[in-house]
Amino acid sequence: MIQDFKETFREVVQAVLPLTAAVLLIMLIIGLNSGMFLSFFTGAIMVIAGMVFFLMGVKLGMLPIGESIGSELPKHNSLIFIVGVAFLLSFMATLAEPDVRVLSTMIDSVSENGISRNVLILSIALGVGFFVSVSMLRIVYGVPIKYLLTAGYLIVITLSFFTKPEYLAIAFDAGGVTTGPMTVPVILALGIGVVSVLGEKSELSEGFGLIGLASIGPILSVMLMGVLA
């Protein structure tokens, strides 16, 4: 565990330090006051500490339990149970996703309550949950991912002609924020776990691609909000 902690700390520092240095340089060039320097530096330290503990939690808890749950689901011999659990886990993981919270807060601040923060979060989570459930069905029935991606984005393109402009922009951002540090480990671990007990399936070709499919869900759900609003 200590070795994992050291490796995680090194990875986080290597990821955060270049950005921190770049921002400090820009702050120096544009001449921000010393109070801003201190605030940013304090925030950077807190980010490093938070990311280290968060990633340790993912490695020690989220990934193992996700794979364990995924590997146990097919043993119940119930497709409804597999789809239901996949939907519930991905839905709850999206609700807990920090990136989704940040996006909804920013939209709420500029829309002056024109777009409900809670409705937006719920819409994004429902979209992710639905498409992760579809991904589980794809794995079980061996449907090529290219067909689902093609169909999904054809629907996205079609809806783009009917969605209000402000919702259209938000929709694609919503698809991006679902690929965050909370949602990704849960979905990937769940998919790999399911594939691992299906002997004829390849973990490389079947266990991945779930994130790409899952990100279509929020795009479509937010677009539908724009059509119905």
Image (cartoon, rainbow, N blue to C red):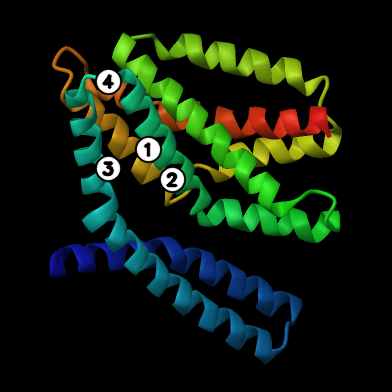
Q: Residues within 10 Å of mark 1 (few under 14, many from 20)?
A: many
Residues under labels 3 and 4: Cα distance? 18 Å
Kind of residue at disc 2:
Thr
Disc number at residue 91? Answer: none
Residues under labels 2 and 4: Cα distance? 24 Å
Query: Would you name the residue on which mark 3 appears?
Result: 66
Q: Quadrant of the C terminus?
A: top right
Residues under labels 2 and 3: Cα distance? 11 Å
Which image quarter: residue 73? top left
Q: Residues within 10 Å of mark 2 (few under 14, many from 20)?
A: many
Which image quarter: residue 224? top right
- Residue 174, x across and y down, in percent: 63, 41
Looking at the picture, does residue 31 appear above or below residue 225? below
Mark 3: secondary structure: helix
Looking at the picture, does residue 30 appear above or below residue 221? below
Query: Would you name the residue on which mark 2 appears?
Result: 183
Kind of residue at disc 1:
Ile
Contact between marks 2 and 1 (CB within 8 A): the answer is yes
Q: Quadrant of the N terminus?
A: bottom left
Contact between marks 1 and 3 (CB within 8 A): the answer is yes
